[in-house]
Image (cartoon, grey):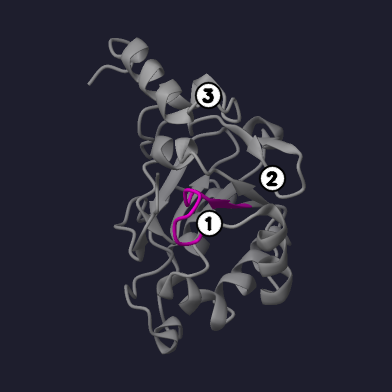
Amino acid sequence: MSVTRHSRRTFLAGLAALGGSGLVRPETARAAIAKVGTAAPPFSIPATTGKTVSLADYKGKIVVLEWTNHECPYVRKHYESGNMQALQKEITAEGVVWLTLISSAPGEQGSVTAAQADQLTSSRGAAPTAVLLDPTGAVGKAYGATNTPHMYVIDKAGMLAYAGAIDDRPTSRRSDVQGAQNYVRAAVQAVESGQSVKTPVTRAYGCTVKYQ
């Protein structure tokens, strides 16, 4: 399908999805669904700090996107085992940007206020660069995020290098973290070394994103 041919249709659909909030720029809507090997859809949405964060702010850096829902058993698996926090700290220590996104609609499972999101970050010892709020789901839909967790790696040139699951153990059992193949770590390492990601696309597992 040609993005150019359908750009106006996609743009109008995206504006409808925004509900007039103005929190996400129209270019996000034009992106359709992101594909590995193409430019990552740009976005500008609020962080829990109240500051608007744009993907363009991190031009020239590797960026990891993590879709989350703190009530999802699959997300809890990775946080209660300490796996997600350890990965965040390991990767951000290397200069990689980690953005955690919450696309749960108001009133749906996983929906939180900025203060609640910050409390979760603190209580779990999480270490993302920022937590971003996407209650309209516009950014999540532009990336094609279907599950929590759903992970993406963007290279320094702004191209999507990986999309899919965090690892190869699609269960909610904490014991399965041990010995799992972590796709995100492998993708970041490949991008850092200038190599192609061996497994650039996998099927994300977890709870469905609770869009409006």
Residue 64 place in picture, x, y as percent: 56, 51
Q: Amino acid at mark 3?
A: Gly
**Front-most of residues 142 and 111:** 111
- Dominant SS of magenta comes to loop
- Report how far apart the C-alphas of labels 2 and 1 lie in the structure: 14 Å
Query: Label 3: which residue?
Result: 20
Q: Amino acid at mark 1?
A: Ser
Q: Amino acid at mark 2?
A: Ala
Q: Residue at x 36, y 28 (%)?
A: 32
Q: Is residue 185 left or right of residue 94?
A: left
**Is 192 included in the stretch rendered in magenta?**
no
Query: Label 1: which residue?
Result: 111
Q: Is residue 193 visible?
A: no
- Dot 2 falls on a residue whose secondary structure is loop
- Dot 3 falls on a residue whose secondary structure is loop
Question: Magenta segment, which residues?
Answer: 99-110
Residue 202's place in the image compared with 8, above or below, is below
- Report how far apart the C-alphas of labels 3 and 1 lie in the structure: 20 Å
**Front-most of residues 168 and 118:** 118
Q: Is residue 161 left or right of residue 126?
A: left
Q: Which mark is residue 5?
A: none
**Is 109 included in the stretch rendered in magenta?**
yes
Residue 107 place in picture, x, y as percent: 48, 54
- Dot 1 falls on a residue whose secondary structure is loop
Query: Label 2: which residue?
Result: 47
Looking at the image, tell me whether mark 3 or mark 2 is earlier in sequence order: 3
- Report how far apart the C-alphas of labels 3 and 2 lie in the structure: 19 Å
Q: Residue at x 57, y 33 (%)?
A: 157
